[in-house]
Amino acid sequence: MFNFDENIYLKNGELTYQTRDTIEQIAHEVHEEGYENIFFISVGGSIAIMWPIQEMLNQITDVPVYAEQAAEIVLKGHQKLSEKSIVITASKSGTTKETVKAAEWCKNKGYRTVSLIGKEGSPLEKASTWTIPNLAENGVEFEYMQLLLFVFKLLELKNDFPQYERFATQIEHLPKNLLNAKKKFETRANEIAKKYYQEPYNIWVGSGEMWGEVYLFSMCILEEMQWIRTKSVPSPEFFHGTLELVEEDVPVFLVKGEGKCRFLDDRVEKFCKRFTKKLEVIDTKDFELKNIDDEFRWILAPTISTSLLVDRLAKHYEYYTGHKMEDTRYYRKIDY
């Protein structure tokens, strides 16, 4: 595969799974202390991967689950956020200023936080009650693995997810499956990037537990890292505005998951097949998950799409645009 080291990737998967005991210990401590609700608080790509998990929890447990932008929560607060809440944050660098400020704000108010952190001794670690070490060098899917292990362990402890042990054991096979998915998608990733990298406007669509994935790739990759003008829209909202911009030469990318909202994706697909010649459907059902039960596929679907998009497709866009992912005009370059 282009610009990819399989051995490093599998090693990152092993390192991630090795944090399972730490994650479960933290979940036990949180459970024993008690909590009334869960708050996901972060920004950008980190909040994007929390939205799918919020969506899943809303279907599985009666524990209230909220997702809030870090920059907003410190200004407006939230009537449901209290010492009885558990706050989950994440920052690979541990220095994302909005997330750090939100964690410090929570600490000052006595709110407990669990943070996924990639850098030991970072400001976010110092502001957090508990920290989960993100040991992988890269790969959004590994952040998903850790978040899923943590929240589903919490659910098991309150008898909302009795399948946890089976799920957590099988998730060890996920990196190898995702590696195979990347290999299968590689040729198509190259074809898509080559065909569309010069398009003046793109539409990305998804729903349910896949919406965060669509948002993440369109904003954090195409806009931030590739400077490609992109519109992202949830499948149910597509028919309340965005559909009017679909013409035969307008690219529409539809990311389909395997949960209950798939029906809404099918509706978008049916429409776009009629009105654009540039429809690209990326369907997680096309990729096998060996040694993982089918009942968990809808939960793991975002890890499949992020492996295909944020990793493989992004690398090919970078090649054709000639624009390095780390090259930004403003982000982390100037004060704002």
Image (cartoon, grey):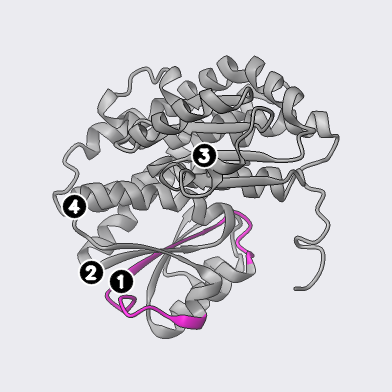
Instruction: Point out the image quarter for the C terminus.
Output: bottom right
Toward the right, the furthest residue is: 322
How many callouts does the rendering have? 4
- Determine whether label 1 and label 2 are within 8 Å by CB: yes
Q: Which span of residues is magenta-colored?
A: 75-96
Identify the residue shown where x is 48% and y is 22%. 176
User: Disc 1 or disc 3, which is closer to the eye?
Assistant: 3
Q: Is residue 171 above or below residue 326?
A: above
Q: Secondary structure at mark 4?
A: helix
Name the residue nearer the viewer: 121 or 86. 86
Q: Residues within 10 Å of mark 3 (few under 14, many from 20)?
A: many
**What type is the residue that disc 2 sits on?**
Glu
Numbered mark located on residue 36 in the image: 2
Looking at the picture, how far across and down is residue 110, in whole percent? 38, 82
Q: Secondary structure at mark 1?
A: strand
Look at mark 3 in the image and give the residue it sits on. Answer: 205
Look at mark 1 in the image and give the residue it sits on. Answer: 85
Residue 135 in sight: no
